[in-house]
Amino acid sequence: MNGCCILFLFHPQLVYHALQLVAFAVLAILIMRLKLFLTPHMCVMASLLCSRPLFGWIFSRLNRPLFIFIVVILMSIQGVSNIQTQLNIKGEFSNIAQEELLEWIKFSTKPNAVFAGAMPTMASVKLSTGRPIVNHPHYEDAGLRARTKMVYSMYSRKHAKEVKKLLIDMGVQYFILEDAWCTRRTKTGCTMSEIWDIEDPSNVGKTPLCSILSKESLPHFVTLFQNNVYKVLKVGI
């Protein structure tokens, strides 16, 4: 054990990687998606178990191939379970309404047309059509969070003229309105308009803008496309 510690002291790169592994572990705990940094680094560090200079003191007491075999078997238990779980998932993803939306965007708007809307939908628009978007699911960026908040004012109780100005200031040309985001409630007080009541108490009691626009978009917006899920509004006339 002492030999192992001494070896770490005389190999600062090992200390660096050990500390980096700890840092990645902390990041993974705080932000789950950042485990993509932890996993490969943890695999690299785990390979050091085969190092005689580092862990020769273990192999002097145990059979080295047997020890490594046991470690691999223990790691495989959860791995095999995860693979079986994924293989048991059967089905086919289909979202006809979104496919119609994306096809309309590709064939009815210019390549530089700027879109705004719900973050998950914006990710699909960017990926499938290549159109510029003003907000997407990058939660860790403060600037994007601020822009998304302005975009989501479409689901507040603000006046259409005020929201239109916010969108124009961000360079938005088309807004994709989704009725589900206007009416969906997981529990009391959790609709978008109710959440906005906390941010914007001066407009409490008014009809949500999204509810108004779902019926009639004029005079501040023009409806260019609509199906049973999505409604594309042109910002400005």
Image: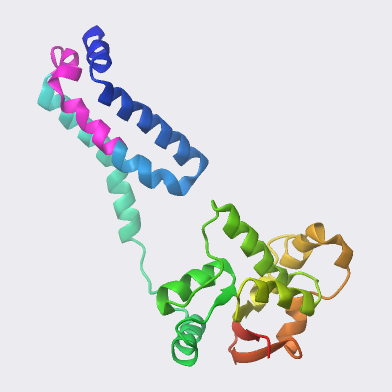
* Residue stretch in magenta: 42-62
Viewer-proximal residue among 113 and 39? 113
Viewer-proximal residue among 215 and 113? 113
Q: Position of residue 29 (x, y in %)?
A: 48, 38
Q: Main secondary structure of the magenta part?
A: helix
Point 13% across, 26% down: residue:
66
Tell me: residue 70, above or below residue 117: above
Residue 186, by quadrant, is bottom right
Point 53% across, 68% down: residue:
120
Q: Position of residue 134 (x, y in %)?
A: 56, 69
Point 75% across, 79% down: residue:
211
Q: Position of residue 210 (x, y in %)?
A: 73, 77
Point 51% across, 57% down: residue:
138
Tell me: residue 174, above or below residue 82: below
Q: Position of residue 172 (x, y in %)?
A: 60, 77
User: As drawn, is 221 to the left or to the right of 23?
Assistant: right
